[in-house]
Amino acid sequence: MRLSSIVVKKNLLLKMGFTVALFFFVSLFAFQFLESTKFFPIGVDTVYAAEQAVTAEKPAGAEAKPDAKKEEYQPAPKLTEKDYPQVKGINGRIMAWLVAQLHLWFAAFVLAVPILVFIVEIIGMATKDKRYDKMAYEFIKVSLTAYSITAVFGGLLLFTLVIFYPDFMRYMANIFSPTMLAYAFLFFAESACLYIYYYGWHAMEEGTAKWVHLTIGWMLNIIGTVLMFLANAWVSFMMSPHGVDAAGVFEGNIWHAIHNHLWNPLNLHRTVANVAYGGSIIGAYAAYKFLSARNTEEKAHYDWMGYTANFIAICGLLPLPFAGYWLIAEIYAYSQQMGITLMGGVFAWLFIIQAVLIGALFLSVNYYLWCGMERSKGAERYTKYIKYIAFVIVACFLVWFTPHTLIMTPGELKALGGPYHKYLGPLGIMPAKNTAVNIMLIFTFLSFLLYRRCNKIATVSWAPIGNAIQAAIFVAAIINICILGIYYGYFTNTVLKVGSSVPQVASTLFVIISCMIIDVFMFKGAKEVAPLQWGKIPDRSQYALFILAVSFTWLMGLMGFIRSAIRQHWHVYTVFRDNSPDAFTPTIGYATKVVSIGVIIFMAIVIFIFWLAHISGKKNVSQGAHH
């Protein structure tokens, strides 16, 4: 196969991105509105919001019924250290921590990949391009081994929790037993769909059978999404209990417990994060195969796969900060104490580490796009802008991880003249960071926009006007974001300061959506400078894909620790106290060491999965040669 034949129509990738967004929207919200529900108001400010919400929903004259109902359920147990079993030589908390995190990493990967496979298969069917089918099949082959490992860690997590935290598991099962049974049955259904989807791939390639295959893929994704929503219900209930009273007595309505205050934002945040994470792991696989390729055809194929995976990661990365902001805002709305502990208390410095990792993500994504311009002979027109984009992204990155307060000795404090730096201190608060991250997102989108058009020349008569409109949108949005961040962030009251983040987000989204629409129409039927030379990308670009995967993994581990640890000494916040010997908040160093060990274990297993896929591919090639 000649390299010139491996040319990707980028508008198909854009359609893929829009289809991803539509799929998420439907799957996230359709399930949640199956029943009539009442949402928490944004301004709820109490750790007992769940109790008040349940009380408010009681009909008049029904005082006797809840008391009778409560007799069926016991309050949350009051445990002592002796109630937590100990196993000699094993720290139950660390084991549960590592196993749960490893399970979550693999679950995120195996939930995201089928979504991507399903969409790529649809594109392949619509375009009748077998390359898409080949890529989708390779995606699902990698995830099949990861699915088995996910199940292993899931079983190990269950045994760990039952052994070390039996009373907690008994209490959660007393409330969520119907969903736990549903989870088990849905897991078997998901397994059946996955194996039929994979092993029936080549048997259902044509005609009606292809539609049956796509239907199975659709069912696989729906079941996987529901499984994630059920697991999110248990986790979010531990943070924002609903459907129980102050003593932890279950009121009897399982939907109230599921649809707690943080369930919706956690569903959205994890779904978007899973897609970005799945793209990053697939990108790492493509980089591994690219570096080990022995001929130009293989290099071209895995270069294309790496680009596609990076595109998917960008699609998830751009909206991810907004989803995270919503989740944190809802945590504040539920409990100011928990919110202040999260951002302004003991965990504040972990957000500095988070900022460094987020900076690594943005720099990796942009660097890969810049290296990708070498595939096209027309890229010389835009490479001169890379240094300016890099300067802005690095400057925003420095603002993003600038701390507000520093841990200093008395001598350093005296020399500085106080706890805040005279010039850099103002950069440590959220208005500056919101401004920086929105500008980083806009310039990352600009990198993609330049890459997208580097091999094309617009032929429409209104191209100069279109470029001018796009430039005006970029400039106006950046000015608006800066004014909102500086004026409302530093010279107005707290309400306006917090509220200004919404129009900042709206400005960024407007840039992305409007400029993308203009670009699609402006380059429709555009003249091609030269065929894209897939495989003609420097090897160093592949290490950006590795950094992307490792940074995402480490970031998920640290943020998962913070989300869990803000409950502090509670199994279920304000309802069920944790009195185990390990019920303490670990230091930043301790937490990062545990998470880093988990990252090393996870990446070692992922490399093993890549190696299995590699030797399996060699076997298939060998068999094909004999035939």
Image: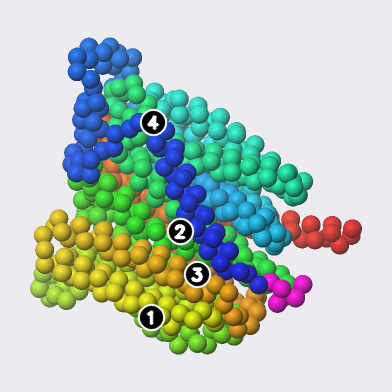
In the picture, measured across the screen, residue 145 lies left or right of residue 430, that is: right
Query: Mark 3 or mark 1, which has the lower sequence index?
Result: 1
Q: Local crowd at mark 3 within 10 Å, few (<14), some, or many (≥20)?
A: some
- Amino acid marked by disc 2: Gly
What separation in Å lies between label 1 and label 2 (alpha carbons)? 28 Å
- CA gap, disc 3 to disc 2? 20 Å
Name the residue beneath numbered marker 4.
35
Q: How many marks?
A: 4
User: Viewer-proximal residue, 113 or 426?
Assistant: 113
Q: Please name the residue that numbered disc 2 is placed on.
A: 316
Mark 4 to mark 2 CA distance (whole Å): 29 Å
Q: Nearer the viewer, mark 3 or mark 4?
A: 3
In the rendered image, residue 2 lying in the magenta stretch gets the answer yes
| Quadrant in which residue 235 is drawn | top left
Residue 421: x and y, percent?
16, 73
Q: Quadrant of residue 248?
A: top left
Q: Which residue is mark 1?
A: 468
Disc 1 on helix, strand or loop?
A: helix
Q: CA distance from mark 3 to mark 4?
A: 39 Å
Q: Is residue 279 left or right of residue 470?
A: right
Q: Earlier in the sequence, mark 1 or mark 2?
A: 2
State left or right for residue 615 relative to residue 539.
right
Q: At 67% from the left edge and 55% from the top edge, which residue is drawn?
A: 125
